[in-house]
Amino acid sequence: MFGRVKPLDAILATAEKKSLHRSLGAFQLTMLGVGAVIGTGIFVLTAEAAQKAGPGMMLSFIIAGFVCAVAALCYAEMSSMVPVSGSAYTYSYAVMGELVAWMVGWALILEYAIAAGAVSVGWSGYMIGFVQNTFHITVPLDLVRGPFDGGIINLPAMLIAAIITGLLVLGTKESATVNAALVAIKIVALSMFIALTLPVIKSGNFKPFAPLGFTGISGAAASIFFAYVGFDAVSTAAEETKNPQRNMPIGLIGSLAICTIFYMLVAAGVIGTVGAQPVYGAHGEVLSPGTAALSDACKALNENAVVCSKEALAWTLRQVGHPFVGWLVGAAAILALPSVILMMMFGQTRIFFVMSRDGLLPEFFSKVHPKFHTPHVITVLTGVFVALFAAFFPVGLLADVSNSGTLFAFGAVSVAVMVLRRTDPNRHRPFRTPGVNIVAPISIAGCIYLFISLSKATISLFLGWGVVGLFVYYFYSRSRSHVGRGVVEVHEDDSDAPDLPVPPMPGA
């Protein structure tokens, strides 16, 4: 019915022979999820959401969080049942066949690589704000913003992408400690922001609540969805998890719940203290985020609006009389956002690794460095593209494009859960999605709703990317697929099959 399907037993057998070291527990997974989720979405995209929805972005956070919650329940069942690397790609391969799996993997490239670029741009905004407010020097906008955002090239964003690429090539085990410290820094910074802003909220700043109507709220939800998507990076670590049947659901749902609470409180603090009304053009039109027109309007306002800020939370604290704490929050973002870039780029290399292991991508993609034992070829290639994305495109555009790939993958996982319940009802499921016939369709509908709420340009780009993916599949991958060639299972007596060394996860 679905064409080339790689049976679950074959996937598990392959992973058992060529597996990663299992060392992550529930707490580490949850912290990795929080580390991947809390980042540019809340530190930066709050301003993007305000320009689209005004105070109505509070509802946007709820909508995006709800869609992620139902998708997380579907992810939890699949990841606990199929505890191997590959995330939505692997699940789709096992249930709906190779073509769907390929398209999901192709879409995940948009999610991880472009998301890493978006976070790099977000880091750049905080770094420049920190430098200017600390040392009182003016940095030329041409060198810190891309051509679509009123500048020429974003050099700081390129720099941080290059540094993270180098760290991933080195593959240091110490990054587990680094990640835990950075997660703590982010949580402390957001807690400080909430403690200082909530007591001085003014109800008048919430009016009008939805200046652009529900259409604006929907558009903001589609963008702010980026603030949640990191949780699925946890599923790429399934093959490195101790007792995945128990720990994967805890890591997925636990990290999402923690982040949702923080997001709602932070958004309320921003809106209630400095307001969050959109900036309009000379003719009363709403200016699109990440455009030269909005950049020019913000210059006329002397950047005196939260929607104009590239460092929304630090700017808000300075406006309400806490410049030093704003400085600390900016420093926290500078220190902590790289962990999100690291997780996104790590997720990208893991997807490439599994697709290469299945023969759908060239084998050299999974080539391992003889000294560092990391997939240096694909890591460097990914880093180059991330740096280019970050150098030339604004954070809002990158986030929207990333979201398009993520929503496609989330929808595919939700379909896979329903299909597998029918085709293999007797398989052991350590975690069962409650009310799957209700939850999964709601997840699918939510993903479609957010996808069509994206801009027409973003949807067109995604469709074009999909056409390119089909071309690559039919003219290269299909003929080289291990499943298509009958190379599915790996047995213990396969003495001629080389053991493929795999790099440890940054959180290992």
Image (spheres, rainbow, N blue to C red):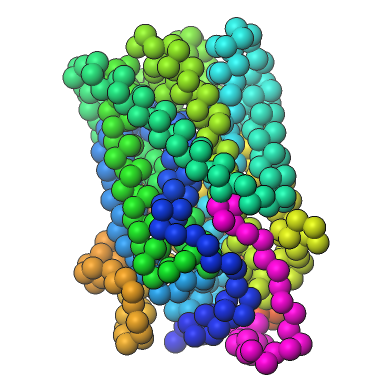
What secondary structure predominates along the stretch shown in magenta?
loop
In the image, taking residue 329 as reference, residue 246 lies left or right, namely left
| Residue 310, image x, y percentages | 50, 24
In the image, taking residue 344 as reference, residue 63 lies left or right, namely left
Does the image show residue 457?
A: no
Residue 484 part of the magenta-drawn span = yes
Q: Quadrant of the N terminus?
A: bottom left
Residue nearest the viewer, comparing 294 with 434: 434
| Residue 12, image x, y percentages | 52, 80
Q: Residue 475 sits in which quadrant?
A: bottom right
Residue nearest the viewer, comparing 327 with 305: 327
Q: Quadrant of the C terminus?
A: bottom right
* Count of marks overlaid on the render: 0
Residue lying furthest left in this view?
Answer: 203
Q: Residue 133 sits in which quadrant?
A: top right
- Which contiguous range is marked in magenta? 482-508
The structure residue drawn at horizontal position 69% and vertical position 45%, both measured from the top left corner, is 167
Residue nearest the viewer, comparing 360 with 298: 360
| Residue 86, image x, y percentages | 54, 67
| Residue 139, image x, y percentages | 65, 15
The structure residue drawn at horizontal position 58% and vertical position 24%, both measured from the top left corner, is 127
For residue 155, above or below residue 4: above
Q: Residue 471 sits in which quadrant?
A: bottom right
For residue 368, above or below residue 315: below
Residue lying furthest right in this view?
Answer: 370
The structure residue drawn at horizontal position 28% and vertical position 51%, both measured from the top left corner, is 66
Residue lying furthest bottom in this view?
Answer: 493
